[in-house]
Image (tube, grey):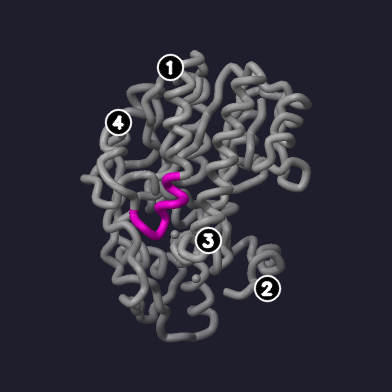
Amino acid sequence: MVVTGGGGFVGSFLIERLRERGCRELFAPRSSEFDLRDRDEIVRLYREAQPQIVIHLAAVVGGIGANRANPGRFFYDNAIMGIQLMEYARRAGVEKFVALGTICAYPKFAPVPFREEDLWDGYPEETNAPYGLAKKMMLVQAQAYRQQYGFNAIYLLPVNLYGARDNFDLETSHVIPALIRKCVEAKEQGRGEIVLWGDGTPTREFLYVEDAAEGILLAAERYDGAEPVNLGTGEEIAIRDLAEMIAAEVGFAGRIVWDASKPNGQPRRGLDVSRAEKYFGFRAAHRLRDGIPKTVAWFMSHRDELREITFGQAGAAR
């Protein structure tokens, strides 16, 4: 089995769970060894690993700021990785390809809860549309390859993920790790306020990383259909309420100031998660009130090692 992005946030948990299930022939290519944007490198990967299953997690990702600064890179890198990995998996005789899409693929004004059948009813939110559309092309490819070649590729749509081992670099992190770090540092430095992007009204849904890993594995084991499937909790929360929840958890009692000159991103995000439970029995084990304390605790216990990796870089929020 090949797991791209196996050394990353979700991938590290997925690898652990695969090993717990007795999977020993695992190959998680590192970017230093295989450039997954390069056709020849992909061919070499499949020749060396000879996988029966490919789970494609690798992606170039970031928050609103990173998406606005790198639209071309986020489109090209994600599109070329997915297209070539699936094409050469087909040519190599891979039995199953699990493609991880993104909630950013949904239309900006999709009705909430987002249902998979609404995926094509509009253009994605502008700040992350290049990334969302690049990942969405894997759904088109998977369905086309199933139709023409009988290739078993499935497509999953996870919501925003969070949890232990997340990226806490303020330049590239998503909203939960960014909020945790901002609140912790403001408390420790005795600052009376923190400033956050937007006006706090957009809503989001979040999936704890360990639940995401379990959902991906269940789909790999049990689902062989053409339809895209959401992975989430069905629990929608306003960013303003999320910020207050995190501030309370870390003990930051100062003001939260909203900078409305900065973009909000998509107005609402919340999923219909019934298809995942129906098709492969997935239901998230963690609600936000369970996952946020665990994430804060992990961050506080790993700050020294994280400081060298992320705190030394210039310090923005998904």
Which residue, given by chain and number where applicable, does mark 1 sit on?
Answer: 147
Is residue 91 placed above or below 192 in the rendered structure? above
Q: Distance between the residues labelled 4 and 2?
A: 43 Å
Is residue 268 placed above or below 65 in the rendered structure? above
When asked about the image quadrant of residue 257, the answer is bottom left
Asked if the residue at tag 4 contacts the one at tag 1, i.e. Cβ–Cβ closer than 8 Å, the answer is no
In the image, what residue type sits under mark 2? Gly
Mark 4, secondary structure of its residue: helix
Which residue, given by chain and number where applicable, does mark 4 sit on?
Answer: 274
Q: Which dot, 3 or 2, sits closer to the camera?
A: 3
Which residue, given by chain and number where applicable, does mark 3 sit on?
Answer: 70
**Please, which residue is most extreme toward the top here?**
150
Mark 3, secondary structure of its residue: loop
Mark 1, secondary structure of its residue: helix
Q: Which class describes the residues within 10 Å of circle 1: few (<14), some (14-19), or many (20+)?
A: few
Give percent across and percent down for residue 252: 43, 75
> Could you say which disc has been placed on residue 312 in the image?
2
In the image, what residue type sits under mark 3? Asn
Quadrant, the N terminus: top right
Residue in view at x 55 percent, y 35 percent: 83
* Nearest the eye: 84 or 275: 84
Q: Distance between the residues labelled 3 and 2?
A: 22 Å
The reply to whether the magenta stretch includes residue 208 is: no
